[in-house]
Image (cartoon, helix red, strand yellow):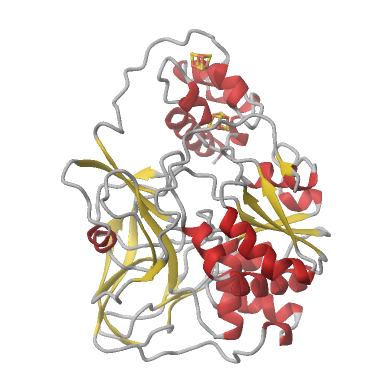
Amino acid sequence: MRVWNFKGGIHPPTKKLGKRSSIEKMPIPQKVSLFLAQNIGKPPKIIVEIGAKVKTGQEIAKADGFVSVPLHSPITGQVVEIKKQKHPVTSRPADVIVIERTSEDEWIKIEPAKSHDQFSKEEIVKRAQEAGLVGMGGATFPTHVKLSPSKKVDVLILNGAECEPYLTIDDRIMVEFPEEIVKGALAFSKALEVENIYIAIEENKPLAIDSMKRVASPLGIKVVKLLTKYPQGSEKHLIYAVTKRTVPLGGLPMDVGVVVQNVSTARAMYRALELGEPLIERGVSVTGEGVESPKNVLVRIGTPISHLLKLARVREESSRIILGGPMMGIALNDIDVGVMKGTSGISVFTDDIVKKRTEINCIRCGRCVDACPMNLEPYLLYKLFKKKRFNEMSDYNLMDCIECGSCSYVCPSNINHVKAFKMSKTVLRALKR
Ligand code: SF4
Ligand code: SF4
C-alpha cells in the first residue's frame, strides 16, 4: 500500500497513550454547561428561558442564518441559569446555558429517522443543519455549509489522520464504529454528488486502517495510508497528500474540487439520519502524562471537563491542562467549562514534560522555514511582529499561517511564533474593520 506525504512538517513523538483504550460511555452528568458559540459563524439564538423544562435532543437555540447551527439539550432537565462565562477559545465573555438534570432521558428526536440511502441530497444537507453538525476535528465549521459548495467538487476525503500527538479518539472511533462512519460518508457523497471517496489515515493507526478497509473497500471507498507526520491532518496538506492538488494561498478546498470531513463528523451524520439524533454527544480523548489512566470516552456535550479529569485520574503533580492536543490546543484555566462540539481531547501534563523555555535571539538557522508546511518564513514574520509592522506581515502571507506550531517546535531559540502570529492576525483583522 502506497504511503502519501506532503512537503515540510515535523515528527514530534506521537505519544498515543490511549490507542488501545476502548471507548467508554461516560455517565450522564447532573448538570451541563453549554456555550452558545460552538461553531464557526454566528452563534445560535437562545429560545428558552430560565425555568424552562427541556428534553434530551430538544432545540434550545436556533440557527441564526446560513452559517450557523442550532444547539440542543444533551439531557432531560430544567434550565437553571443563562450567564456569561469566559470562553476558553476566544478568552472573551460568552453566553452559556446551564441545565440541571431532572430525570432519565426523554428524547425529542429529529423526524423522520430512516436508512441513510432513503434521504435525498437536499434532505441530507437540511438534516446536517437541523442536527447542529459541525466539523468535529476541532474546526467546528458547520457541516451543511461544507455540503453546499458553490463550485463543482469531485472528491470527498474523510479525515482520519489525527496527527496531533497524544489524541486517539478518532483512531478508536474508526476501530469501533466503521459502519457508522461509512454510512455517513455515503450520505456526504450523495449530498455532494461525488463518486471518489477517500478515507485518509496516518500509518500509525493499523487497527483503524484494517477496520475501515474491511467496511469501506467492498463499497469502492478508498482507504489511503498517510505518512505519520505533523500537521498531516491540516486540510490543505491532506488534500495534497491524497490528490496532489494544491489549494491556492487564500483559497478553499472546493477551489480544487475537494471537500474534507472528519471521520467523527461522518459518524454524527449517520446518527442524525438513521437515529434522528442531534449532536449532543461526542468522543473525547483524556490523555497526557498528567493522568494515570488515559481514556477515550463518549460524553454528552456540556459535561464539565472536571468529570473527565476525575475519570482519567489526574496526577497530583500535573500542572497544565490543554483543551486539544499539545501542538494546537489551548491552555485551560477553568476545568468546570463544559465539553464543546469541537473538543476532541483534553491533554494533561506534568512540570517535567512542560519545561518553561527562555526565548533568546533568532540565530537565523532556517529550521522554521524548513518545517513550515505553508512555505512561510516564520523568522521573518516574527521579526516584523517585534517591530509591529503588521501590514508587512500580511504581505508575507501571515493569514495563510495555519497556527500549527511546527516553527516553534523546531526553533533552537525557543521563540513562540504561534502566539505572536495569532496576536498579529487579530490586529490585522481589527485594522481591516
Ligand atoms: S528556527 Fe528560530 S532561530 Fe532558527 S531561523 Fe527560525 S526563528 Fe530563527
Ligand atoms: S505556525 Fe504558521 S508559520 Fe509556523 S510552521 Fe505553522 S503555518 Fe508555518
Residue toward you, 66 or 239: 239
Q: Position of residue 194 (x, y in %)?
A: 81, 65
Q: Give the residue at x 54% y 77%.
A: 131
Q: Position of residue 409 (x, y in %)?
A: 47, 27
Residue toward you, 183 or 324: 183
**Does residue 168 sit above or below 101 in this rendering?**
above
Q: Give the residue at x 64% y 29%.
A: 8
**Does residue 102 sit above or below 28 in this rendering?**
below
Asked whether residue 153 appears in the rendered view, the answer is: no
The number of numbered badges drawn on the structure is 0
3 relative position to 161: left or right: right
Quarter where residue 158 is shown: bottom right
Residue toward you, 377 or 240: 240
Q: Position of residue 168 (x, y in %)?
A: 46, 54
In the image, farthest residue toward the left: 316
**Does residue 366 sit above or below 142 in this rendering?**
above
364 relative position to 224: left or right: left
Quarter where residue 135 is shown: bottom right
Q: Position of residue 383 (x, y in %)?
A: 50, 15
Q: Give the residue at x 54% y 32%.
A: 11
Asked whether residue 210 appears in the rendered view, the answer is: yes
Viewport quadrant of the C terminus: top right
In the image, farthest residue toward the top: 363
71 relative position to 49: left or right: right
